Image (cartoon, rainbow, N blue to C red):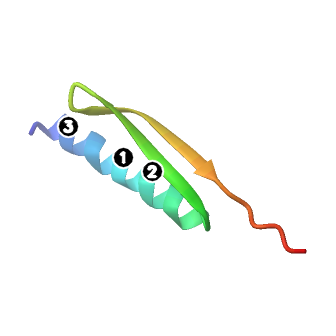
Amino acid sequence: MSETDEKKQSSHFEILEKLLDTMRYGSITLIVQDGKIIQIDKTEKYRLKD
């Protein structure tokens, strides 16, 4: 793995950590093409109290 690829991978992990830190309920979907993450979809759910 080249140094550029390692920086990109590190950046992706940082983005995922930030998403996880701000979410309480939901899901994260990674879209991969040719072995590289090209898109991150986040679906967040909010619980409504009666």
User: Which is more N-terminal, label 3 or label 1?
Assistant: 3
Residue sitting at the far top: 34
Q: Position of residue 23 (x, y in %)?
A: 59, 63
Rendered view: 13 above or below 48: above
Q: Which residue is mark 1?
A: 12
Q: Which residue is mark 3?
A: 5
Say which amino acid is labelled 2: Ile
* Marks 2/3: CA–CA distance: 15 Å
Rendered view: 14 above or below 31: below
Say which amino acid is labelled 1: His
Residue 31 picture quarter: top left
Image marks 1 and 2: residues in contact by CB distance under 8 Å: yes
Residue 30 picture quarter: top left
Q: Which residue is located at x 43 percent, y 54 percent?
A: 16
Q: Which residue is mark 2?
A: 15
Q: Which residue is located at x 44 percent, y 60 percent?
A: 17
Q: Which residue is located at x 36 percent, y 46 percent?
A: 12
Q: Position of residue 1 (x, y in %)?
A: 9, 39
- What secondary structure is marked by label 1? helix
Residue sitting at the far left: 1
